[in-house]
Image: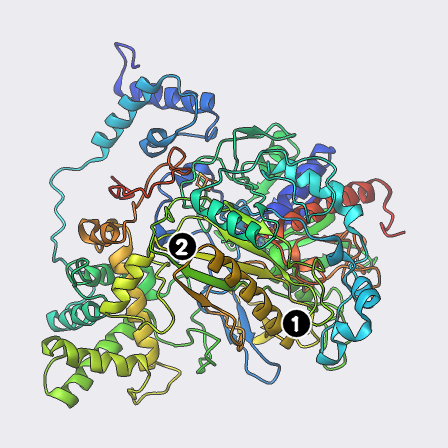
Amino acid sequence: MPKKNMGVSEMAKEKQFSRRDFLKTTGVATGGIIGGSLLGGLIGFNMDGTENTSTDTKSESSESSSEGLIIPEKGRIFFSKDEDFKVIEAAMERIFPDSDIGPGAKELGAAYFLDGQLAGAYGNNSREYMQGPFYEGTATQGYQSNLNRAEYFTLGIRKLQEESNDRFEKSFAELEAGEQDEILKDFEDDKVDFDIPRSTATAGYFFQLLREATLEGVYSDPIYRGNRNMGGWKMKQFPGHQHSYLNLIDSDEFQDIEPMPNFG
Amino acid sequence: MVKELEKVDVVTIGAGWTGGIVAAETAKAGLKVKSLERGGYRDTNDYQRVHDELKYAQRYELMQDTSVETLTFRNKRDERALPVRRLGSFLPGNGRGGAGTHWNGQTDRYMAYDFEIKSMTEKKYGKDKLGEDSGLRYRDWGITFDEMEKYYDKFEKTAGVSGEENPLGEKRSSPYPNPPMIKTKSLKLFEEAAKKLELHPVMMPSANMSQNYTNPDGEKLNQCQYCAFCERFACEYDAKATPDVTVLRTAEKTGNYEIRYNSNVTEIVTDEKDKNKVTGVKFIDTETREEYFQPADVVVLTSFLFNNYKLLRVSEIGEQYDPETETGTLGSNYCYQTGLGATGFFDEQYNTFMGAGALGMILDDFNGDNFDHEDLDFIHGGSIHFTQTGLRPILNNKVREGTPAWGEEFKKESVENFTRTLEVYSMAHTGPHRDHYLDLDDTYKDAYDNPQVMLTYNWTEQDNARNKYLTEKCAEIVEKMGAKHIDVQNGDLGDYDIVPYQSTNISGGTPMGTDPKNSVVNTWLQHWDRDNLFVAGSSTFVHNSGNNPTGTVGAFAYRCAEGIIKYHKDNQRLED
Ligand SMILES: Cc1cc2nc3c(=O)[nH]c(=O)nc-3n(C[C@H](O)[C@H](O)[C@H](O)COP(=O)(O)OP(=O)(O)OC[C@H]3O[C@@H](n4cnc5c(N)ncnc54)[C@H](O)[C@@H]3O)c2cc1C
Ligand code: SF4
């Protein structure tokens, strides 16, 4: 508990120390200062000073909440053209469509997820080996393109549009579901010729990227802007981030648990 | 200008399990020890927001950055090797604790049969059984299980392994330091089914703590919370034995140990005056890009398989293996494991999203030579596993064979099956083959201008036959568990694929032995050509077993540390 007549910074220091002492007595993370996340979740320990902890946790979360920050639901940073975004949104919706068991990729915001990803390390392949020379690999050698994912998706969307215009004289986003599926199936089967070296890009590999990104978009933590309202998790009965299952792990009953995001 | 640092007694290259064990033991013995670790510092404070599947399991936050260093790969010698641009099949570690930070903690021992595979097989089935004609190159390790037992025991106590006596296991000198993990409903279902088939399931030996535990070095670990973000994640509870919370802390407590982070070793330097010795290592500070020389009495390569091989090769220590002539040893004996099984689809829902990295049951009835191979066209076998490691939704989308991979039907099935599929799978041995090896690839360079390692690897006929046998055994168990539908992965393995994650259980490249003609190090892991150079890790394995490797990796690291202490005292080669 903070003592009276203390300066703000002293108080902050005191708070940190008491938390560290607490952690020492429980034997967890002896090295430093830990946020509220862990403390709430420790089950199976002898927790003296719980009161102290819960006030700490509360004050910390109110400290870090910044009022007035509004992220527009439909805000984008990567896709500058509306039409491109509509195409990718429509394609993702066919991969994971709205149905009687729950929302589809569109409602879950999977395309907004991809928008954020393509603007960052994933889109730039920053943690991947991108030195040449580039050759088309065998099926077992994996990603060999000279393009990064941001470029690959841009190209893939262009090819979806070309294919759609050739076959139906419409934008991919405006096609009937069945027509969209027909094109996507040909992409999946690598039957669409991109008319560029296969070492650069293929329809088949673009489809794989698209499918993988869709699943990531519907099931990743909502902090990444997909899985809206945790609808993907609710549908799959995945409880997201729970601190501990120690008290439930030996239960013979199925546990339907309200999901929690990583930053709840 | 290369800056020269103050000499130490022992330098390890890397600070994972092997580096940590060697550091802890030698520092406790009073030697001045330093680890050079290419990655950064990290500890439990970094893991308070670790329950993020995308960041850790999909984007490999804690693992090796391939833009800095990767390998190239091909299935066959006549193919062009191409770089592994994105990690896949295996996930090498990086930073304090290495891969031990994000391992599962399944802590097995190898079998007596593993260490003497050639002589035991030959004696029982005759020489032909070893498949020499098909290119397989089996040999004994040069050490027996009985000689290794005390080191296994030591590692298990350090790591607080929980488990129960395995009726098919080798004799133990003492029981597991902790009781088994909690047996869940689905584990019980597996156990009952296996017992009905007269098999011998036991709780999987686990380095996730079944209770609060203090290890012999005084390091405290907490009870596992079954939080389900374990494999590929770090533990926010100090409940998983990792190098960070055990051996590295032990080494640091002595006051004789220091880790220098962001220090990427690029060369081991041979003594110009005495070609049988090394003088230290060169490394690059990855932040400042300055180059340093770290002199040491003893150098220990603990940088995981690929870099254990690579640093020897670029430093021109030892002779590269040539598959054409089968001469040279460096790069030989690379092996992997198959890990397929059978998936059961059930009506009932299970708490598949709860679990721990090493929560499971295991049986050895079809492992090693525990079953008769007279009429089979393969040797060895594998352990059979049923685990509850905690499923997460991006990576787990089970559908029955033949179901489309996308669209409404896919969605319905994959969503429903998330809690309704249970999988029994094998972890199977593969043997050393003439054509499977490591080399350097001069076409592709790493960030320090060294060539990338080149891997040539494929499945063999024996691997196919073994996999078919084991996956069908898995299917029998799944059937007894009452599945309404079963998919079995008993088809042809095809070519080994570097893309999907299989396991980080790779071995070989710097194999041990008793003869410098076919090995790189002796059974103390001392290099044949440099007396004060040691190499620890699965790179020293002669073949890959039907069990997880790290129990054996840890046991040999303890033996190696004992050898280093002895060597540092009397400067004698250890095999003499
Ligand atoms: C997801 C996952 C799950 C696993 N689960 C299990 C399991 O359940 N059971 C089991 O037995 N095994 C498991 N393993 C394998 C286990 O993690 C390894 O066997 C073990 O950690 C290897 O220890 P090591 O010390 O040999 O190598 P590492 O832990 O890889 O340590 C090597 C260190 O060296 C550093 N390094 C590399 N090159 C250099 C250089 N040039 N200069 C400086 N430093 C360098 C690296 O950064 C790294 O920190 C798993 C692995 C992974 C990735
Ligand atoms: S499952 Fe257990 S050991 Fe693994 S990360 Fe969670 S609490 Fe730690």
Subunit ID for the residue under disc 2: B
In the rendered image, residue B388, in percent from the top left (x then y), is placed at 45, 48
In the rendered image, residue B387, in percent from the top left (x then y), is placed at 49, 50
Q: Against B271, is A17 above or below?
A: above
Q: Residues within 10 Å of mark 1 (few under 14, many from 20)?
A: many
Is residue B94 shown to the viewer in this render?
Answer: no
Quadrant, the N terminus of chain A: top left
Label number found at residue B437: 1
Q: Is residue A119 left or right of residue B2?
A: left
Secondary structure at badge 2 equals helix
Q: Residue furthest right?
A: B576
Is residue A57 shown to the viewer in this render?
Answer: yes
Q: Residue furthest front?
A: B196
Q: Amino acid at mark 2?
A: Ala
Q: Which residue is drawn at the image coordinates 55% and 82% (left, top)?
A: B80
Q: Is residue B12 left or right of residue B45?
A: right
Determine the image quadrant of residue B324. Answer: bottom right
Residue pointed to by mark 2:
B57
The tag earlier along the polypeptide, 2 or 1, is 2
Q: Against A200, is B229 above or below?
A: above
In the rendered image, residue B521, in percent from the top left (x then y), is placed at 77, 58
In the rendered image, residue B486, in percent from the top left (x then y), is placed at 43, 64
Subunit ID for the residue under disc 1: B
Front-lying residue, A223 or B189: B189
Q: Amino acid at mark 1?
A: Tyr
